[in-house]
Image (spheres, rainbow, N blue to C red):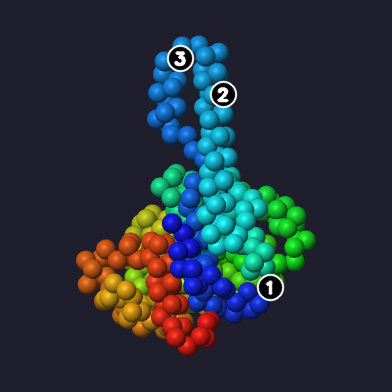
Amino acid sequence: MYFENKSLLSPPTNRAAYSDRTAWIMAELARLAYFKFEGSIDIEDVANSLSTESDSTSIRKTLEKLLDDKQQTKDKANAELNSYLSLCDFNLVAIFNTNGTQAFLASSRAYQINVLSFRGTEAEIQDIKADLKATTIEVDGHKIHSGFYQAFSGVKEDIERELEALKGNGYPLYITGHSLGGALALLATKFLAADSMGACYTFGSPRVASSEFGDAIKTPIYRLVNAADLVPRVPPAYAQHILIALFELIRIPFLSKMLVTILKKTVGYCHHGDMRFLTACSKSDYSDLRLLQNPNIIDRAMRLITRLISTGFKAGATDHFVLGYSKKLAAYAETRNKGDGAWS
């Protein structure tokens, strides 16, 4: 279920500054983006259905029936998504599903905000290709991860159209996403809401672009990282420079030149926005959790090494789960504001 911490459902929407409650709500909306609101057809079911057909007419009729069933499934999934959103006083405005990139747009009269939430990485070929295509392309003078930019470009015009239609309500736009969804949220902030009255909240987001990419973004960006989550450490920011220097020094015939050429296409990545670092916890209720603002690289490196060693390196993956982000943020918000009436 979603949005179970009812005491947190009162975000301070009159300001775009970082908020514990808003961070949790955005994490839940990012988690909700993984819900299969686009409907689905199992490829094995399609294969089994067509295996008994022997002519093109029968195949066409079978496919038409399957597509009709998919539409019904999509309508049901949309209704279910809307029911989940209503738990947090949001209404579904639109869904987006193009070439493996999914997102939804929702609006809340109660909070007077609009939210655009992107789905993160799934075990699907389009998402895997987007993640792995780490070479950069130049857009408006900035170096951007080519896979992420391609994934975002597929839904950009549809989102622009829906946002234009939604302008009438006058609400600020908040953008969120986890993992790949966080990367897409940052791109959407840059190209669709660089001067928004809202904010961008990302969870476990990888690096997306060069430092100049964020120069013109006025919208606040809050980048949350959970303990030993390894995804925010990629693509590397410094390793390429070390490897380039190494290969230029040892000069392996043919290989060095080729590798240096490839590595130069992946340099320049950095993070954007203000980091909120969720520390590792030894207590199941997260009562020993701390939320650190922009900790230095040495502090983070020490915490990462300690966490990875203590968990047999499993935490590199488990700390990336979006549910972990949501649970920690809920516990932190409830604990920090307990009894003093001073919500943040």
**Residue corresponding to mark 3:** 53
> Looking at the image, which residue is at 55% across and 13% down?
57
Q: Position of residue 230 (x, y in %)?
A: 37, 66
State the separation of the CA atoms marked 3 and 1: 56 Å
Dot 3 falls on a residue whose secondary structure is: loop
**Residue corresponding to mark 1:** 197
Please indicate whether residue 234 sits to the left or right of residue 65 in the image: left
> Looking at the image, which residue is at 58% across and 40% down?
75
Q: Are marks 2 and 3 in contact (CB under 8 Å)?
A: no
**Residue corresponding to mark 2:** 64
> Looking at the image, which residue is at 40% across and 74% down?
331
- Which of the two discs, 2 and 3, labels the residue nearer the N terminus? 3
Dot 1 falls on a residue whose secondary structure is: loop
Picture quadrant where residue 109 is located: bottom right
Q: What amino acid type should be assigned to the residue bearing mark 2?
A: Glu
Q: Position of residue 300 (x, y in %)?
A: 37, 79
Q: Position of residue 42 (x, y in %)?
A: 43, 34
Please indicate whether residue 301 sits to the left or right of residue 221 in the image: left
Dot 2 falls on a residue whose secondary structure is: helix
Q: Quadrant of the N terminus?
A: bottom left
